[in-house]
Image: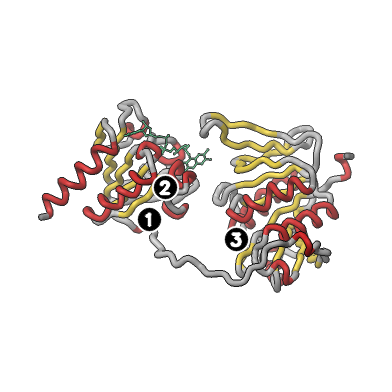
Amino acid sequence: MNLDDYRGILVFAEQREGEIQNVGLELLGKAKELASEINEEVTAILLGYQVEHLSKELISYGADKVVVVDEEELKFYDTEAYAQAFSSVIKDKKSEIVLVGATTIGRDLGPRVSARVVTGLTADCTKLEISEERELLMTRPAFGGNLMATIICPDHRPQMSTVRPGVMQKFSKDEARTGEVEKFDVEFDKSKMKVKIIEIIKEEKEKIDITEANVLISGGRGVGSADNFKKLEGLAEEIGGTVSASRAIIDSGWIDHDRQVGQTGKTVRPDIYFALGISGAIQHVAGMEESEYIIAINKDKGAPIFNISDLGIVGDVSKIVPMITEEIKLLKS
Ligand code: FAD
C-alpha cells in the first residue's frame, strides 16, 4: 500500500428521514480544521434515497465536496447496503481520513466498513490532531476514562475514527459557501443483502427534558444494578422529581442518552440535585455544579462529589434511598 496515494478527508453525513444528524455537521467542522493543516479537501458522503438536496446544507457547514449515493436500496438504514455503498466510495476516492459519528448507525457501520477496506478504526475519539509526520492522532479514553490513549494507524489507509455526538464543534453555517456535488453509482451485490425491511414502527417515547426539572434524582455506577436504578423512580415520584444519570449508567444502557448529565450530556440547574453513587468526575460536575442545592450519597467519604455538595451522606445508596423514600411517604400521609 502506497500511503501517499490516499488523500483528503471523508465525513459520513448521517441522515435520518432526510434530516442530517448534528454529529455529521460537527465532524465536518473538525475535518475542516484538520484539512487546513494538511492542505486537503473535506468531502461529505451522503447515503440515502431522495436526499441529494441535503448536499447544500453539508457545503454550508464546511464540506468542499459532497459525494451522494442516492438509491432506493438506501431508503432505510440497512447495514449491508450502507456498508457496500460506503466502502465503494472509500475505495474509489482513496480517502486519507474517514470520520464517522458514534451513533447507533455509525457504531454499526464504521467497524464493518473499516474491515472491508482493510484498515483499523479507533472508536469514541475525544480528540483528533495531525502529527508532524502527517498522521492522524486519535485520542480516546481508556481503562474506564482513567487515562487517555493516543492511537495511530501507521500502515494502512484510510485512518478511521468514530466520535460521539456533542464532542466536536460545528463550523458556523455559511450559506454562501459553494462546493461540488458528485452523484456516485454503486453496483449493489444484492445476493449479500439478507434483510428486507417491511415496516418501521417507532417506539413512542414520552420526551422528558431534564434541563426543565426542578428536582433531579441522578444515579451513578454506585447504584449497583439496573433493578436498583429503577428504584430511583420511586423516590422521584414521591418528591416530584425526574431521574437523570451519569454517563456510566447511559453506557450500561439503563436509561436513555437524553437523561445524561455532564460535558457530553446536558447541563442542568435544578433547585435540588441528588447525586446518588456518583463519584463526581470533572465531566459530570461540569453539567450540574450550578444546581441550587446538591445532596450527595456515596460510600466513599473521599469521593470528589462531596467537594461540591451542600449535604453529603456517607453510606450505601441502596440502603439509604429506600429509607428516604419511605420517610417521605410517611411525611405525606
Ligand atoms: P464511578 O466514577 O465509577 O463512581 C461510582 C461512585 O459510586 C464511586 O464514587 C463509589 O464510591 C460510589 N459507590 C459505589 N458503590 C456505592 C454504594 N453502594 N453506595 C454509595 N456509593 C457507592 N460522565 C458523565 O457523567 N457525564 C458526561 O457528560 C461525561 N462526559 C465525558 C466526556 C469525556 C470526554 C470523558 C473522557 C468522560 C466523560 N464522562 C462523563 C465520564 C466520567 O469521566 C466518569 O467516568 C463518569 O462520570 C463516572 O460515572 P459515575 O460517577 O457514575 O461512576
Is residue 237 positioned above or below 69 on the image? above
Disc on the earlier residue, 3 or 2: 3
For label 2, being within 8 Å of ligand 1 is answered: yes
SS class, disc 3: loop
Is residue 146 positioned above or below 23 on the image? above
* Residue drawn at x 45%, y 55% as measured from the top left: 258
Is residue 125 visible in the rendered structure shown here?
A: yes
* Residue drawn at x 78%, y 37% as measured from the top left: 134
In space, the residues marked 3 and 2 are separated at their CA atoms by: 21 Å
| Amino acid type at mark 1 | Ile
Is residue 137 positioned above or below 328 on the image? above
Circle 2 residue: 261
Tell which of 44 and 169 is nearer to you: 44
Residue 84 x, y percent position in the rendering: 77, 58
In space, the residues marked 3 and 1 are separated at their CA atoms by: 21 Å
Tell which of 69 and 292 is nearer to you: 69
Residue 250 x, y percent position in the rendering: 46, 47
Residue 21 disc label:
3
Residue 210 disc label:
1
Q: Circles 1 and 2: CB distance less than 8 Å?
A: yes
Is residue 36 visible in the rendered structure shown here?
A: no
